[in-house]
Image (tube, rainbow, N blue to C red):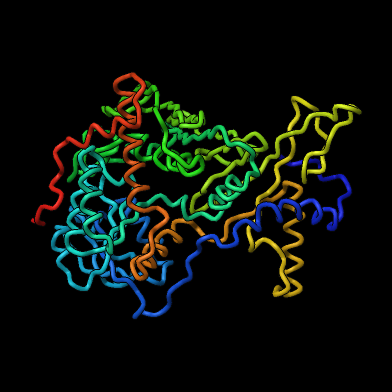
Amino acid sequence: MAEDTSKSVTRRDAVKTTALAATAAGSLITGAPWIQKVKGANNQIQFGFIGTGSRGQYLLKHLKNVDNGRCMAVCDLYQPNLDKAAEIPGTNPKKFKDYRELLNEKNIDAVLIATPLYMHFPPTRDALMAGKHVFCEKSLVFRPEEIHALRALSNERPKQVVQVGLQRRYSKYYQVAKQMIDKGQLGQVTHVRAQWHRNTFQRDPWNKVVPKDRTDKEQNWRKYREFSGGLTAELASHQIDIADWMFGSHFEYVVGVGGTDYIKDGRDIFDNIQLIYKYPKGQKLIYSSITTSKHLPMFDMSRTEFGEIIIGTQGAIHITVGTDDEPALAMWFKEPELPNASTGAKKENYGAGASLAGTGKGGRAIPIFLDHHKPTEKDSFLASELKYAKLWLYGKGIMMPEEERNPVDVSLESFFDCCKTGKRPLADLEVGLMDSTAVMLSNQSMYEERRVYFNEVDKLKDAKPAAAGAKKA
């Protein structure tokens, strides 16, 4: 991706090189959803948090960055997790071990749920029945009958917000990528390649040390099928949702293979999965999750573990949501053009300034710019010069543009905003239910070693509802 920086390139050249990409991509975010902060205690949504293990504590730390919500209560069965969580918000929240007691609190407007996957549905159901808005981590539901039960229950309560924790929907880079697709800038989008690779021989986040007062199934529930959807639910769910969003449809069928081949610790989930999804227009999602290497063949190998490549007939986008320590990134590769048929001369790649052969040699990545990257008349002289300098570095591949805010913070802030305004979340109930359906069908494909069709979910309508409409205990 980077090129020889010894060549003489002026700032004017750099700006000229990057201006095309800035115009083509950065301007696309006009009108993109972005939530303004709500200031003041009177404007805050008062919430309770159910499930304060590792993920719950992570979200509570991010909630400290969000002004339009206030933590009033936390709930967990395990006392050490409950005590740790209560210290995070700085609001002296009440502590509960029974989530139903938390739901009885009249001053709580909304709840956030980060329990183990198999326990997502009961508190979500009961929270809706108690009149609360709900943010639930992905996957939204665990069992087939819960898909239909939660949809029916939520449809009976249209004024209550249900949002699922798929934060890529709240990333500006992913929003711009979708707009580029819709405007035809990638041509016909035919494939998405996605991966989430880890090296559990270095560190296994799903095989934590078991305290004396817990069992392995309580501490490391993700390892067991009775509680967990494995790699598909915990990791692939994010990226299946991206493919659905970018393709604009759900897949027709999935075929996959998985195995418990390398980690022998008593788990019965797969430690590696490979899945192929076929979409209605012939598009494919090709997915891989392994636990033996975290290599990522993207971004000049400067990042590891996870990311997606969106591939079209006129170009491709490399994209990742990043982490707390590593920002979201997006790079655009224009499809190399063939030599001129009449003269045999090579054409230059759009915006890259590099001559390309017809085959074998690709072009340098074009950074995707957002509004905050570009100089404006409102910038001070120093701020403007700094932006120009960064544009030069971006154009040379020395630096990559970064997203202004963590999409996790944006998704949480957006949830509270939706609670106040009644707006529909970007990651709403149907997004969550379709993603959960994909997880279940993907695992079924691997367990049964066969092609599984998306419309097989219709057969699940005859399943006994999981207490939809039942009274809260």
From what the image shows, is residue 277 above or below residue 184? Answer: above
Residue at 35% x, 52% y is 164
The quadrant the N terminus occupies is top right
| Residue 313, image x, y percentages | 65, 34
| Residue 247, image x, y percentages | 50, 39
Q: Residue furthest top?
A: 449
* Residue 327 visible in the picture: no
In the shown orientation, is residue 4 left or right of residue 24? right
Front residue of 106/303: it is 106
* Corner quadrant of residue 66: bottom left
* Corner quadrant of residue 40: bottom left
| Residue 238, image x, y percentages | 42, 43
Residue at 15% x, 49% y is 468
The quadrant the C terminus occupies is bottom left
In the shown orientation, is residue 285 left or right of residue 218? right
From what the image shows, is residue 463 above or below residue 42? Answer: above
| Residue 14, image x, y percentages | 81, 53
Residue at 59% x, 33% y is 297
* Residue 452 visible in the picture: yes
